[in-house]
Amino acid sequence: MVAQQQDQPVEGRFDGIEHRFPVRVYFEDTDLSGVVYHANYLRYMERARSDMLRLAGIDQRAAQEAGEGTYAVSALAIRYRAPAKLDDALVVVTGLMQVRAASVDIHQRVMRGAQILSEAEVTAALVGVSGKPKRQPREWIEAFQRLVGQRDQEA
Amino acid sequence: MVAQQQDQPVEGRFDGIEHRFPVRVYFEDTDLSGVVYHANYLRYMERARSDMLRLAGIDQRAAQEAGEGTYAVSALAIRYRAPAKLDDALVVVTGLMQVRAASVDIHQRVMRGAQILSEAEVTAALVGVSGKPKRQPREWIEAFQRLVGQRDQEA
Amino acid sequence: MVAQQQDQPVEGRFDGIEHRFPVRVYFEDTDLSGVVYHANYLRYMERARSDMLRLAGIDQRAAQEAGEGTYAVSALAIRYRAPAKLDDALVVVTGLMQVRAASVDIHQRVMRGAQILSEAEVTAALVGVSGKPKRQPREWIEAFQRLVGQRDQEA
Amino acid sequence: MVAQQQDQPVEGRFDGIEHRFPVRVYFEDTDLSGVVYHANYLRYMERARSDMLRLAGIDQRAAQEAGEGTYAVSALAIRYRAPAKLDDALVVVTGLMQVRAASVDIHQRVMRGAQILSEAEVTAALVGVSGKPKRQPREWIEAFQRLVGQRDQEA
């Protein structure tokens, strides 16, 4: 029903095994060079990953409050190809590349229409409250594996 | 058509003379106290104002690129009543209070359901490329006056 | 000794009962209008308050880790008088106005030389892990009262 | 004279051919996991690069205002090894790896004492107002080459 969807924050969606998440560019995202500040693409990508987890049934807030830890980026490589500008309607496209016991490898690209503005490979690891890496719950790994269409789990 | 709306960033809407704009809380918004960092409510409110301008037919990016200036906050008073948390679905409700020649007074509140988390009064002034205040274009003032339902313009 | 001060982050200092804290403007702080984004003055002011607490002997991190809570801004009113630009060397001047059992009122202004760029009145309240306001430890109140030169505590 | 240095923002320094820049962690830098949000290390690194340019005699603000362009990150690869926490006193250590006609390769690491918290390789390219890459001014390249101790310029 339309009425129920009023006032709901944006949600991404899966298109096959890729997750698509829309982002609008606001003043806060730009710097004096007139385009989006380079670090802010990492914020966009993190929003998309969080949305993908939510859609996959993984509740980060509940996990964090239950002391089960949070995902932390352990490595990230990004290329900036073209700048995004104020008011641009962007889409962050996210694909899972590999699922390991304690971490996942993710590919993300920020698109404006058919143009790739930036793309990144990100490794996110589950980290316990102690700050140490920990194994992802089995049901999370299974949710990821369904996304990645991957049959063989590498430990 | 649904297909056209796919991958579109969130848009607010007018409910009578109030503008409603949904916001999701992400990791980037929180601090170590576990809730949204106080300065980030100002980012939410600015997104809502920018969306309201877009819906009212005012193109901030075109104006900025044409050298016609941008809106700058000249005064802001905010009260924080309750904290927002990761994953919260919020709505920023914005109402125009008064339209002057070179500035507007705005009331904004950040809601989670029926609860007011924070509310602010904001004065935004149009500022030219020189950094000096300037008169708002007549058609912008008229657009605001339609929103505010205000008959008498104060100069 | 000079050698000991190498590689130390900036520290503020007390000049009488006012605390002075230097800030440099970087790209991250600006937006496409070419000046500092309005919400970022709140970040500068918060850095100054944290530095003032440190100099006053109040260890926010230890308090937070010990579950004693953190300060949260409960109200803030700010006026923006002139914009700050990239590379500007600013000073945040902070004065305590009033100390109450569970909160303090603070006046802050962001200066560039003798010019006031923005000024704010901020109420910061101690908040426990439950999210509820709590009384400030006696030694913190005493530290504040020394700063404010205030003899009578208002509960 | 000490009096002149009062109220000055922090400045980095060269230690041989490495640039060292101190950073303090504030609330704004952390997220609810209790440590510094991953994108914020990029802000620290950008502050250090800007400071290094300033010390090398390159005035980014003058260049930007004169329409000569600004540096933009074109590629960045970062590894996160250990988290930084509130109040930590960090040092960003920056070394130039290679100077090309229109870009430079830089290595940066964020240290807490002797511990590497994160390290990155960054390519920064000079970008004109049109958004196109442009050759760096000869005197900038020479300044970089003195830093890198590199004799042969690669075009």
Image (cartoon, coloured by chain):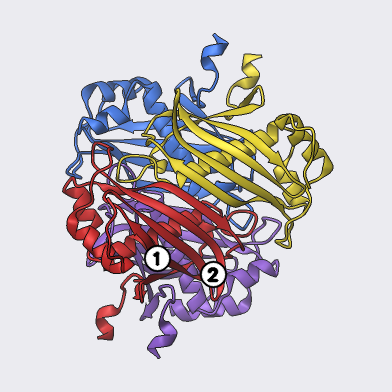
Chain colours: A purple, B red, C yellow, D blue
Q: How many discs mark residues in the rendered view?
A: 2
Give a yes or no on whether discs 2 and 1 share a subunit.
yes
| Picture layout, residue C10 above or below residue B52 | above
Q: Is residue B115 above or below residue C57?
A: below
Q: Position of residue A107 (x, y in %)?
A: 40, 64
Q: Amino acid at mark 2?
A: Asp
Read off the residue under disc 1. B95
**What secondary structure is found at the residue carrying circle 1?**
strand
Q: Give the class, few, some or many, for how many residues have Cα within 10 Å of label 2's Cα (few <14, many ≥20).
A: some
The x, y position of residue B39, in whole percent, is 51, 51
Residue type for callout 1: Gly
Q: Residue at x 30, y 44 (%)?
A: C33
Let me know if residue A121 appears in the view: no
Image quadrant assignment for residue B114: bottom right
Q: Earlier in the sequence, mark 2 or mark 1?
A: 2
Question: Going by the picture, which residue comes out furthest to the right?
Answer: C138
Task: Examine the rendered structure and indicate whether residue D136 appears above or below residue B144.
Answer: above
Quadrant of residue D66 within the rendered picture: top left
Kindly indicate the quadrant of the structure image that contains residue C115: top left
The residue lying toward the viewer, choosing from C96 and B102, is B102
Residue that mark 2 sits on: B87
On the rendered image, what quadrant is the N terminus of chain B found in?
A: bottom left
Say whether marks 2 and 1 touch (CB < 8 Å).
no
- Return the x and y of residue C51 as percentages of the image width and height: 63, 35
**In this rendering, does residue B34 appear at all?**
yes
> Measuring 68% from the left and 50% from the top, which residue is drawn there?
C125
B78 and D6: which is toward the camera:
B78
Q: Position of residue D91 (x, y in %)?
A: 55, 33
Residue located 39% across and 32% down the image: D50
